[in-house]
Amino acid sequence: MSRLLITIGAILIAAGLLIKFGVPIGRLPGDITIRRGQGTFYFPIVTCLVISVIVSLVGWLFRR
């Protein structure tokens, strides 16, 4: 349980630092944005893939 909490904390700290220094998390090239009339649909597919890879790598490193 402690490793899980440390991992989640490290991920949150890293995300906070990235946002603070201006990395456009959530608006990466490849994310889908559709604007029609007064509505907007946004699907962050590339952002989800990047976050998934990072979380998988961190989990893999902690399991070793």
Image: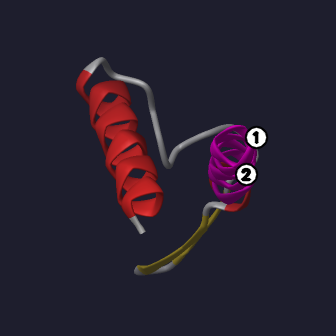
Residue 8 coordinates in the image, percent (x, y):
40, 55
Label for residue 20?
Answer: none
Looking at the rendering, the stretch of residues picked out in magenta corresponds to 48-64
Residue 10 belongs to the span the image colors magenta: no
Query: Would you say residue 58 sits in the magenta stretch?
Result: yes
**Element type at marker 2?**
helix
Which numbered marker is on residue 64? 1
Q: Position of residue 30 (x, y in %)?
A: 76, 46
Left or right: where does residue 61 sit relative to residue 24? Answer: right
- Which numbered circle lies on residue 56? 2
Mark 1 belongs to which amino acid? Arg
Along the line of sight, the residue nearer the viewer: 1 or 28: 1
In the rendered image, residue 36, in percent from the top left (x then y), is placed at: 57, 76
Quadrant in which the N terminus is drawn: bottom left
Q: CA distance from mark 1 to mark 2?
A: 13 Å
Compared to residue 58, the image places residue 42 above or below, namely below
Q: Residues within 10 Å of mark 1 (few under 14, many from 20)?
A: few
Characterize the magenta stretch by its predominant secondary structure. helix
